[in-house]
Amino acid sequence: MMPPEEESPDGDRDGGLVLLHGPKSGSTRKQGCDPFAQTQRSKLQHRRARINQQINKEMRMRAGAENLFRATSNHKVKETVALELSYVNSNLQLLKEELEELNSSMDVYQNESESISVPMIPLGLKETKELDLLVPLKDFISEHYGEEGVLFEKEIKEFMELRQAMRTPSRNEAGLELLMEYYNQLYFLDSRFFPPTKTLGVFFHWYDSLTGVPSHQRALAFEKGSVLFNLGALHTQIGARQDRASLPGLNQAIDAFQKAAGAFNYLKENFSNAPSLDMSAASLTMLVRLMVAQVQECVFEKMTLLRAQYDFLARLQLAQEAARVEDVYSLVHQTMSQPHVKDYVPFSWTTMVQVKSEHFKALSHYFAAIALCDCPAPSDAELLEQEKAFLQFHVTMPEGPSLRVLLQDPEERRKLGKAHLKKAIMKHEEAMRIHGLCKILRKMDILQEVLSFAHKRSLSKYSEIDHEEDFFETGEAPDIHPKTHQKPEIKSPNFSQVKVTDLFHRLGPLSVFSAKNKWYPARRVHLMRGENGFGFTLRGDSPVLIAGVIPGGCAAEAGLKEGDYIISVNGKDCKWSKHAEVVQLLKSTGKEGVDIGVITLQGTECPKAVDRKAAVMSSGSGMLKSNKENSRKSLMNSKSSSTLLVWSKKSKRSKKSTYSGVPFTAVGDNEAMY
């Protein structure tokens, strides 16, 4: 994953949306939906939250009863507890059925257009409990960073407000940005407050999206994964609400479902051992395939809009597109029927997927029949192209005359078309039969309407081409080879799309001031300028590094060491200061000397000065160079706690400049002596 950029607190960036400007007051906080807004979607989410809480309560009661049952030896108590357990299990089953019905409420998420289209399957958001991080973060700041935790209450509360807002994201681009913003802030939170060998002592509680079963972990990865899951779920809701009767609506739906597939796929590949079933590898594989199938369905609908004038080849393409949709939905149904997923996925989902598989297989045979029966025989100029297309159309070639005779003989075309229609009608009836087995789907009028319309259309066409004098037995139409002209793309989340500033930037640059690094207590050193200056060389920015100390010089006598980082000059915080800014503070020092605050990282080697640098340092001269730390690069390309930073730019200065009357010339790239 590409981590969010770390930036100086005074720097804005172009080319991205910066949602937070850490040190600036009055920054705009994106809000979630009004939790009291009485929309159908919010009512559904409220009911889901209530059921989740009830399931949590019943499961705690069951755990207590099971413990008592195992612990007691009293026969009468065992009977009473067994009765209580049966009651609790019955309640859990009822709650599970109620939640399944909520997860099957696909109509709530569909668009409000009057056009008739097959409903899509969206996901509800995972629910989470409120989390109070005020005390744990303040304690960590005091213990690890040596700062007053109370001074960071504003930043902690801002983070908690962001978490509260992301629990109810709006169903639009702003809601997606809100989830992405919080996810990116978790990168900084992880780096600042979660050391490799210690936990923060807080639990992240999340409810399973489909079963409502609560889970909790101390690992921040569980929080990240759950937010990523909700990002994918929100994409499914946005995709389901698009008006797919228009080309822009279809393109938006395709984009949303592709991004949902990308979020679930990224979650599957980068997070493991999740405690909830909805984030298991088997469930995520199923969700990715489901999203890909819904993309393929949208592609078919797009083809029907673009092919306004149906010629022979266009109808063959539609038939193959429909066969492709049937193919991917069959794969989804197989995935949903696997042991680890079968008892977990709502029955209405499995039924809907099976219905769609049969429905689109019927459509593929219907469009094949229309191509054969409604389109005229090809001219000599068209024959070669139609032969080539028809040669790759069926999985197995149909029985009967040669391909050329078939295409040119209207009667042979009618016979094969009739066989395709017969198969289409059978598949339509199978889709309607499976649909009738699910009580929840029977309540969806629009799905019933779509299936009924397609069935009647095929029956009408069959009646039209069926002749009374037909004495031949209608043969078995071969299956149609699936083919698509727009392969679904799994779009991974673009985390750099929403750029954020580290809320806890005041702690210092992450390259040094992170949870994985440890340093000795800060030291305050008073320096007096000697004849040859202070006697040390500086390197880099944010924070500036003491790269070398002259033996016997003022700095050495005061206790400064190679590898120390300057964090303050005369009480002014310099963690984020540029090289030139620290130099200017040192230049302004009078006869009274200067107080420098420094820290030394534990377990790191001091940077070694090369012989050339040492020789020039001993001569008491040097050249000031301004450098810029490429913190982004050092963060991404190095996982070690390096004391040396990465520099990318050098400013041009005169080879002869003065520092408080002391001349100095070049001491080496990226260093300056004082």
Image (cartoon, rainbow, N blue to C red):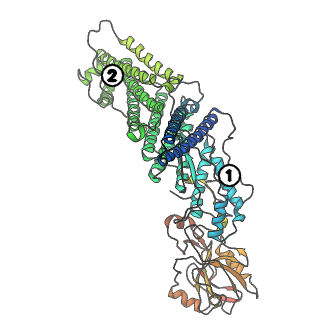
- Residue 489 at least partly seen: no
Which one is in front, 16 or 181? Answer: 181
Label 1: few (<14), some (14–19) or many (≥20) C-alpha neighbours in 10 Å: some
Is 335 left or right of 492, judged from the image as shown?
A: left
Quarter that holds the C terminus? bottom right
Q: Amino acid at mark 2?
A: Ser
Between 286 and 378, the one nearer to me in the picture: 286
Coordinates of residue 663 in the picture (x, y in percent): 66, 89
Q: Position of residue 154 (x, y in %)?
A: 71, 59
Q: Tag 2, which secondary structure?
A: loop
Which residue is the site of mark 1?
161
Between 552 and 618, which is closer to the camera in this rendering? 552
Number of marks: 2
Image quarter for residue 195? bottom right
Q: For label 2, count other residues whose C-alpha is less than 10 Å away and answer few (under 14), some (14-19) or many (20+).
A: few
Image position of 624 with respect to 80: above or below: below
Q: Secondary structure at mark 1?
A: helix
- The residue singled out by tag 2 in the image is 379
Residue ID at (45%, 20%): 454
Residue drawn at x 66%, y 44% is 32
Residue at position x 49%, y 44% from top? 74
